[in-house]
Image (spheres, rainbow, N blue to C red):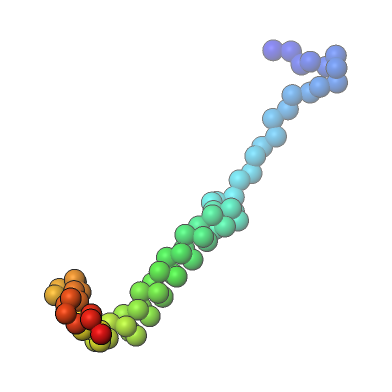
Amino acid sequence: MKNDTTKGIYMKSAPLISKPWWREPWPWILMAGPALAIIGCIITIALAVQHFSDQPIVDGGVKQGLVVTKDASASVE
């Protein structure tokens, strides 16, 4: 193997020093969006359960399991 010195190009391999993945900024930047979405979902669910879980139905509806039905005769005013 010979060196190509005719054009002033020297092929030297420089040692690459890499840091562990947790010391790089890009993994943390990429994980920030989904992490914030998860935190937002948890806060939304907690607020919904705390403030709106025990509200009665006041418009003449009947709750049967997860289904709320309204009587047709009750809707006539």
- Asked if residue 11 lies left or right of residue 26, the reply is right
The percent position of residue 44, horizontal first and vertical second, equals 40, 74
The percent position of residue 66, horizontal first and vertical second, equals 19, 71
- Asked if residue 9 lies left or right of residue 40, the reply is right
Which quadrant is the N terminus positioned in? top right
Q: Is residue 61 above or below residue 40?
A: below
**At 50% from the left edge and 57% from the top edge, which residue is drawn?**
31
Q: Is residue 56 above or below residue 31?
A: below
Name the residue furthest front. 77
Q: Is residue 23 visible?
A: no
Observer-nearest residue: 3 or 74? 74
Which quadrant is the C terminus positioned in? bottom left
The percent position of residue 68, horizontal first and vertical second, equals 20, 74
The percent position of residue 60, horizontal first and vertical second, equals 21, 84
Q: Say which quarter of the image contains residue 16.
A: top right
Q: Is residue 30 above or below residue 59?
A: above
**At 38% from the left edge and 80% from the top edge, which residue is drawn?**
47
- Asked if residue 8 lies left or right of residue 75, the reply is right
Name the residue furthest left. 64
- Asked if residue 3 lies left or right of residue 70, the reply is right
Observer-nearest residue: 10 or 70? 70
